[in-house]
Image (spheres, rainbow, N blue to C red):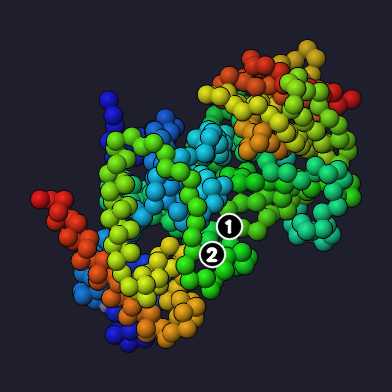
Amino acid sequence: MDTQELCSMREAYVLDGLTDEERRHFEEHLKTCKECQQEVTALQEVADWMLYDFDEVEIPDGMESRVLASVFGDELFEEGSVAIRSGGAKTGSAMDSRPAVDSGSAMDSGHIVRIPQASRPSRRTSVLRWLTPIAASVLILAGGSAYLYRQSLGLSPLRESVGTVQAQLPMTAVTKGSAAVLTVADRLSQQSLLIRFSGLPETKGSQIYQVWAIRPGQAPKSLGVFYPGRHGQALFASVLPKGYPTVAVTLEPHAIDKQPEGKKMFVANLT
Amino acid sequence: MTRTDEELMRDIAEGSRAALTELYRRYERPVYGFALRMVRDSQAAEEIVQDVFTRIWKARDSFNPSSASLRTWMLTIAKRIAIDYIRSRQRRGTLALDSEEKTYDVPDRAALPDEMASHADTSRQIRQALDSLPSDQRIPIERMYYEGLTQQEIAEILSVPIGTVKSRIRLGMEKLRRQLTSVEMEETL
Ligand SMILES: [Zn+2]
């Protein structure tokens, strides 16, 4: 590439219209070409100005709580509670041939968030296993196995095997109009709990839904918190600890409660 | 007492969630408005907002709060994410590459607080400046900047040599630059 050609890339450079390779060449050139340095500085101002070509619009209801739950949810993630590890590319049921077990077996999720055990110090830089911000997830039950498809921004869905479905039962709802179906799946001797919700009442203020494992005579164990997505739907996934016969869902007044304080919304007995 | 953007960014760098929440409240509206303008889909726009603030939070140890205007910086991040999204959507073939002009619906304008009025001014100025360009200059600039197309892709879509694309973009950018300069001069008067 000759100098003249390189200099002719200035506009495309500030408008982000170069291929990666072209950009590398141009940036190399930019280090030594005084004229390009001056021009790029001036053109960048125009490009920055163009960022403001938009109207300010009404923002969607509940966006703040969904976004912040997702941003902070990452590092509230408890190490060791990974329910679902990547199953890798497996043959068999693909997204478009979903042999649904029941008609509602695929749905958009809300945003799943987990909290650590109260004693666990929060880690400044937590390494995420799979709970990067989840845009939408779909739970697929097929041929006795459960798969979680994570749809994240700009990527094709990631399929993760949750394991073999061991049990599926509706949870008893306290509030009319809301429903939850609980699935227990087993993989590598680890049990996973997946709950699909629909018709959940919206959260208000600092409210959040929290899932608990309950064993008689002991303090309930928090499995995580979540916000419902659009239309009151949510998909919650977590490890199911051994020896807890009951799972309950509460609507908590605050984001991180060590003990259930809010209204009980759903309950299910696993035995 | 209101913290400045710089103070806010310093607190975020130290891991303050309250500061990030404040930053979010300060910039939710422009970032969302911009994302919606880019992707024209409210759910995707919300995902972009989420991605912007997640990236800021994750990179809080390393960012440099002294860089230019925070608003511009955040919109630039949003633009990068939106372009990735648009390009992946194009790859999936849901966006026709050959359409010359696209219309899009945006929700009704919200009732804006006074401080937002200056944004309305800025956006009107840039829109007027873009609209004043001949379409053979405006279209390649817009498609490159707002849709992430390369010079080569634009040349193919418009069926013109790449040199023609470059010169149209250069002419258009020169005009925009002159208009921007005159806007700045008016504002300093
Ligand atoms: Zn040069």
Specify the farthest residue to the left: B189
Q: Share a chain, discs 2 and 1?
A: no
Q: Is mark 1 on a helix, strand or loop?
A: loop
Q: Which residue is at a point 52% across and 45% down the rendered structure image? A: B46
Rendered view: A10 above or below A85? below
Question: For mark 1, does the 10 Å Cα neighbourhood hold few (<14), some (14 to 19), or many (20 or more) residues?
Answer: some
In this rendering, position of residue B122 left or right of residue B98: left
Q: Mark 2 points at which residue?
A: B87
- Between the residue at mark 2 and the residue at mark 1, the CA separation in whole angstroms equals 8 Å
Residue A6, image x, y percentages? 32, 80
Q: Percent x, y for residue A101? A: 87, 45
Q: Is residue B67 above or below residue A205?
A: below
Q: Find residue B112 and report its image quarter.
A: top left
**Which subunit holds the residue at mark 1?**
A
Task: Determine which residue is flagged by label 1.
Answer: A154
Residue B34: percent from the left, percent from the top? Answer: 42, 51
User: For this view, does A34 lie left or right of residue B12?
Assistant: left
Instruction: Please tell me in which quarter of the rendered image ligand 1 is found.
Output: bottom left
Image quadrant where one finds the N terminus of chain A: bottom left
| Residue type marked 1 | Gly
